[in-house]
Image (spheres, rainbow, N blue to C red):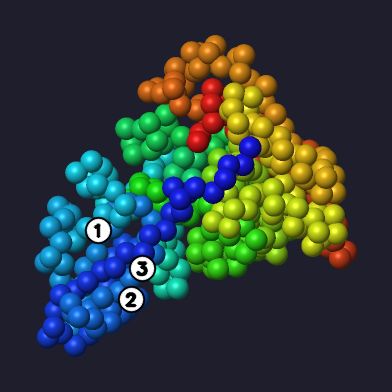
Amino acid sequence: MASAWNFKDEFWFNVTFVCRSHVAHHVHLCGDFNGWNRDSHEMLRCAEGFSVTLPLSEGFYEYKFVVDGLWTRDEHNPHTSHEHGNSVMFVHMDPKVYGHRPQASPYREYQRPHSDGSQFRVLCPHVSPEVASFGILQRQVYVYLPPSYQPAQSRRYPVVYAHDGQNLFSTPGDKGGPPAGGWYLDAKLDGWWLRGELPEFILVAIPNSDFVCIGNRYREYCTAEYLDTSRDAFIRYIINDVKAVVDDQFRTLPEAANTFALGASAGGLLSYVLAMNHSDTFSCSMCMSASFWYVDRSNRSAFDLAKVHASKWKKRAHCRLYIDSGDGEGDNMYDVKMMDAVLLESGWRPNEDFVYFLDECRSRVEHQVTSCKSVNNGMNFHTPIFKDWALFSSLFHSSTRCDKQILCITKILVHVRYRARSLH
């Protein structure tokens, strides 16, 4: 069930940066929280020199001051990064306990050793200054193209935007991927497309930035206000920065009818919010084991969002949803089941407007975990297992609107079944 609001669920902290210079004329603050844009945050004069206050989440942030055009570190901050000599600000965390997360390069890279790379592209979309000012970090975005993309030069494709993009591919843990090797979605798509079991589309994998700053994933994926996400920084980043670049550089079908969101856990919650509040951009979402338990700072839940939209749309679905959970997820299983009941009460038609699936897998967990050792080397058996993908085909289908055939994904994407327990 959705829990009451707790101060620990608030991810924002007002952090004041001070440059103790009384002779400077102009001082700006730049760091990994604003894409190192030297013009983003101008510091104002104060009794101690110059200062600026920013909302940041729990974690650590590298920064420098630009003093009259010259880059300088904060001489009054003893914490510095070893590689670049930047000053480091720890927010709501003890540097002696947490320290730095290892980071060999500005962006974590993921390779696909089983492929020649012709279907795998890497983008690094610019983060607009107004979005960067809220701490949204620049990152690599991974684009997986269908096999017909190169030969069919005149063809355009639907697009699926997937969250936690660093987990989607078949990169082994010793090559920079997750310890268990990820979701192997690229390999699954290759097989389905080869056998003609799934219409082709472009997959855009957007990684979270939790590997840079602890807590970033929650801040990015869990909106501060369910009922008004028009100013949500990460959603603006997805729509205005990432989608805009993808539509510009690839042959996409950019309209909402051909734009979808996919996510699991907190990423499933974000996918739900994108479809509910931004159906003019995302017509449907796949929400796997979504974190419907999350309550925003106004003490509203995902269920409240569904009820409000039922009133607004007069009990008609304005988007399409797929929601699921496994029977080993504890309370989260009941939250997803409650969402099924709320959608039904709100007038959504099962198997037409949405699909709810409960994976009764708990009795099979131990056998399946044991038998998958050869596939998932290094699997931590005390964490959820991403395994046993299945096609999902009953919800998204071709339809006709305004005398124009709209290409939809008919057996859309995958169903990842959570094992053992919930991710959160």
Report, in whole angstroms, how far the alpha carbon at label 3 lies from the one at label 1. 12 Å
Residue 360 % position (x, y) = 67, 22
**Front: mark 2 or 3:** 3
- Type of the residue with mark 2: His
Instruction: Tell whether 191 sits left or right of 392.
Output: left
Question: Which residue is drawn at the image coordinates 53% and 13% (left, top)?
Answer: 366
The label shown at residue 231 is none
Dot 1 corresponds to which residue? 89
Kindly state the secondary structure of the residue where label 2 is placed: strand
**Label located before the other in sequence (1 or 2):** 2
Q: Is residue 292 visible?
A: yes
Mark 3 closeness class: few <14, some 14–19, many ≥20 residues within 10 Å: some
Question: Which residue is drawn at the image coordinates 82% and 40% (left, top)?
Answer: 351
Residue 404 % position (x, y) = 83, 63
The label shown at residue 54 is 3
Q: Is residue 151 visible?
A: no
Question: Which residue is drawn at the image coordinates 51% and 26% (left, top)?
Answer: 385
> Do callouts 2 and 3 mark residues in contact (Cβ within 8 Å)?
yes
Kindly state the secondary structure of the residue where label 3 is placed: strand
Residue 65, by quadrant, is: bottom left
Residue 155 % position (x, y) = 66, 58
Residue 111, by quadrant, is: top left
Kindly state the secondary structure of the residue where label 1 is placed: strand
Q: Along the line of sight, which residue is nearer the eye, 333 or 157?
A: 333
**Label located before the other in sequence (3 or 1):** 3
Mark 2 closeness class: few <14, some 14–19, many ≥20 residues within 10 Å: many
- Type of the residue with mark 1: Met
Residue furthest out toward the right = 403
Quarter holding the N terminus is: top right
Report, in whole angstroms, how far the alpha carbon at label 2 lies from the one at label 3. 9 Å
Dot 2 corresponds to which residue? 41
Residue 311 % position (x, y) = 81, 59
